[in-house]
Amino acid sequence: MKKMKDLIKSEKYNRLTEYLKKLNKVAVAFSGGVDSTFLLAAARITLSENVTAFTVRAPYIPDWEIDEAKQIADKLAVKHMVFETAIDDSILHNPGNRCYLCKRFIFTKLISEAQKLGIAYVIEGTNADDTKDYRPGIKALKELGIISPLLENNITKEDVRNFSKLLNLPTWDKPAYACLLTRIPYNTEIKEEELRRIENAEVFLMGLGFKGVRVRSYHGLARIELNISRIADIFHNTLRERIVSKLKSIGFKYITIDIEGYRTGSMNEGN
């Protein structure tokens, strides 16, 4: 109870709830990540039953993320709909404007599904810090009239994590993730078998305790990105051998470690 009172004292949080009240009934684009989980929770608290979570299952979304999204929606007692989709032809070769094209494709579908339910507003979790990075998908959201309440109310990633902790959300300290297409170089044909190989490698590494790990894939070569503080750990002989054995068994020919460590947008470097 005290944590909830502390949260309610926040001017930013109160502005967000007032903003959501004006929308009355919403569909939340829900991935199970830090931002969308907080937005879904805030909407559920504010709008009660007038909230539906929309999750998209696609070949480039890891299965474990879908499972987590289902668990969180169930915990929040929110109506939850999962929509299956294939890889759209527009992004089949991972073009440089992939994020823009993908957002257009996915959110056009979500708008259609919302309209079937009589829901006028589709909202999503872009926060105020996202505008500082290269995010072509934001343009698509604006073109489609998708609402970004966190961005509109200047709520940062730090705010989201702090509010999530006060709300006891399991995602408050969850590492940032991105779709599996970000692991593959631009202008490369997307193959589902490669996506599964990347997913299996990352799940294995996360199981070893490496949070927020990325496995970038280059035609059979795996470039592993870790938090810099954990890079030395991976060279322990037994652990190194396990990683090499596992990644080769699922189809990678060469396994490398990026000594610059994990960083967002590393696939944009040199493009």
Image (cartoon, rainbow, N blue to C red):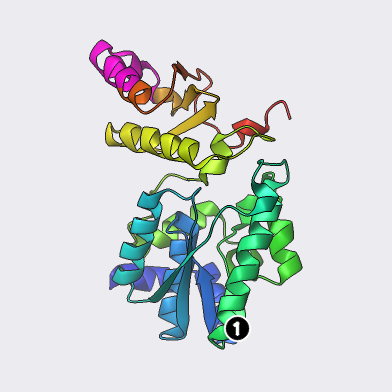
Residue 126: quarter of image:
bottom right
**Nearer-the-camera pick, 222 or 167:** 222
For the view shown, which residue lies furthest in the left direction?
A: 238
Q: Tell me residue 104's x, y (percent).
A: 68, 61
- Where is mark 1, residue-wise? 115
Residue 175 rendering spot, x and y as whole percentages: 43, 44
* In magenta stretch: residue 235: yes
Instruction: Identify which residue is drawn at 39% across, 48% down.
Output: 174
Residue depicted at 57% across the width and 66% down the height:
124
Magenta highlight: main SS: helix
For the magenta stretch, what is the residue range?
A: 230-245
- Apparent side of residue 65 relative to residue 268 in the rendered image (left or right): left
The residue tagged with tag 1: helix, strand or loop? helix
**Nearer to us in this view, 88 or 121:** 88
Residue 25, above or below 109: below
In the foreground, 166 or 197: 197
Q: Which quarter of the figure is the C terminus placed in?
A: top right
Q: Residue at x 56, y 77 (%)?
A: 113
Mark yes or no: residue 148 visible: no
Q: Is residue 149 visible?
A: yes
Q: Residues within 10 Å of mark 1 (few under 14, many from 20)?
A: few
Q: Is residue 41 above or below residue 115?
A: above
Q: Quadrant of residue 24?
A: bottom right
- Percent position of residue 229, x then y: 40, 24
Q: Is residue 177 left or right of residue 268?
A: left
At x 55%, y 32%, the residue is 263
- Type of residue at label 1? Gln
Q: Position of residue 58 (x, y in %)?
A: 50, 55
